[in-house]
Amino acid sequence: MIELDGVGYGYGGRTLFSDLSMALAPGSFHFLTGPSGAGKTTLLKLCYAELTATEGRVTLWGRDAAAMDRDAVALARRRIGVVHQDCQFLDHLPVSENILLPLTVAGRQDEGGQNLRELLAWVGLTAQAGRLPPELSGGERQRAALARAVITSPDVILADEPTGNIDWEMSQRLLTLLIELNRMGKAVLIATHDLNLIRAAKAHVAARVLRLRDGRLLQAGADL
Amino acid sequence: MRPLPVPVARVLGLLARAPAEGVRQGRRFVAFLAGDPQADRAVPPTGFTASLTLLTSGAMAFLAVFALALALATGRLAERWGEELAESATLRLPPAEGDAAATQVAAALRVLDQTPGVGEARALTADENRALLEPWLGPDLPLEALPVPQLVAVTLDGEDFDAEGLRARLAAEVPGAVLDDHTAWRAPLVVAAGRMRALGWLSLLLIAGSTGAMITLAAQAALAANAQVIRVLRLVGARDITIARAFVRRFTLRAGWGAAAGTLAGMLAILLLPSADESSGGFLTGLGFQGAGWLAPLVIPVLAAGTAFAATRAAALRTLRTQS
Ligand SMILES: Nc1ncnc2c1ncn2[C@@H]1O[C@H](COP(=O)(O)OP(=O)(O)OP(=O)(O)O)[C@@H](O)[C@H]1O
Ligand SMILES: [Mg+2]
């Protein structure tokens, strides 16, 4: 569904990474690790066409991302649920409406109801549904961001540090949700520093761990 | 009933034309205005630009009502003056007594009767003369005691009327007769009235243009203020047209309501103008709407909303194309 082929990204004369290839196929489960500043967030942005690769080719459902027009990018993004590292909410709308936003912009708001209630309960935000995002704690915001990323049941889920501010028990609940979606055939990619999370996932799914370091993408072994 | 002035008739005609297509577009437009409340809430209320748009479109509509009234009234005036000008003339015979007077009138009528382009010629009666002079000299005028000229009202009905030829014949056959075909003093008035009408329509165009420009600026300000909101909407897969629609709907409704209020205020102001008989009161008191003309200003809010729709849509789509 999403393929990177010899992709590189640079800005201002500096190359962040280059010649990087991977494929997010249906049912695949990936972790992306690497030191801070290695370019994990940047790599995810290439996957949802927020940035354009400076070399190589990013393909979204068979189409070259660099050649897609704005409407095509919008339609592709509806098939990708993203947990942004900085969450990206509309601060004037309550949490529940923020979570429903991907359905709203797609004109599918009537599909929300039941899913929303179950999701809110699962991520423990039922009581916070009517609050505004700035009133939430960091962990609550990340849980809301994950709920928003999966509300449309998208084909691909990209999560950037989804458990950074979240306690271990809640992290496992979120992981369980992603594993369930993965079993339904969704492709999941989680960028994280949390080795415990990776180990916990590996107990349930055949997750591949990619390591971004010094501008290269490596397949990490069992050693992590 | 007087026919509607052409531009207004054309606008109304456009609205009425091709009912099937028109109705379909109308329904789509109404659905668009009704909107999707949830999607609209995605863009936060823009308090400042909102009241600004409401206020300016109200003020512009208020001005537009007067420009429209001016255009219509001067149009009526130009038309009527033009018609009277083309259709009538007056012959003034020197004061005379008894038989001399009758002979003089008879001679004048005979000349007029033989003049091509003259439809009807009629000597004014003493009562009519008195009525004409009353505003200046008061009632109970002893007209018989005064050397008052005899007037002959002449109706013209042909293109081939030759004022100079008639004057020459009158000079020979009815000495002292003066032909006034109104051309000399009314022609500049007709030109002026026509010019005023053109200025009225030009003012309307300028008002529409400034409204469009003002709304474009307001829309751009709203888009710039909401850059982060737009970014988030994009990230969750909103298309440009969806984002634009939320802004366009707002500005269209605001401009429409503002203009409706302004139009009503303007119409009320015109309605409350002290009234006087248009024929005697002349130009200023005639500055109003007549009959079906009262429907014309109702087009203003529709035009304002249409202008806002087009301006905001263009501004939004352009801004969204260049943003990120
Ligand atoms: N357009 C840009 N202009 C300037 N610097 C940029 C740009 N894009 C990325 N960077 C830099 O590239 C580096 C990689 O950023 P990125 O956010 O991808 O790292 P990351 O691996 O996600 O780090 P973290 O684990 O801290 O989230 C950072 O040093 C960032 O400042
Ligand atoms: Mg990052």
Image (spheres, grey):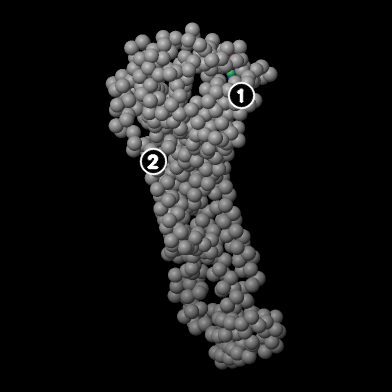
Percent position of residue A220, x then y: 52, 12
Disc 2: CA contacts within 10 A as few (<14), some (14-19) or many (>=20): some
Q: Is residue A219 above or below residue B153?
A: above
Indicate yes or no: mark 1 CB to ligand 1 under 8 Å. no
Is A12 placed above or below B137 here? Answer: above
Of the 4 image quadrants, the one containing the N terminus of chain B is: bottom left
Asked which quadrant contains residue A103, the reply is top left
Q: Residue at x 47, y 75 (%)?
A: B131
Task: Name the element at disc 2.
Answer: loop
Whether residue B269 sits left or right of residue A13 in the image: it is left
Foreground: B66 or A195? Answer: A195
Q: Nearer the viewer, residue A215 or B43?
A: A215
At x 53%, y 37%, the residue is A72
What type is the residue that disc 2 sits on?
Asp
Quadrant into which the C terminus of chain B falls: top right
> Does residue A134 sit above or below B239 in this rendering?
above
Assess disc 1: are there few (<14), some (14-19) or many (≥20) residues with their C-alpha within 10 Å of its C-alpha. Answer: many
Whether residue B167 is visible to the viewer of this picture, yes or no, is no
**Amino acid type shown at disc 1:** Val
Q: Chain of mark 2?
A: B
**Residue A75 visible in rendering:** yes
> Marks 1 and 2: same chain?
no
Horizontally, is B57 left or right of B101 in the view?
A: left
Image mark for residue B36: 2
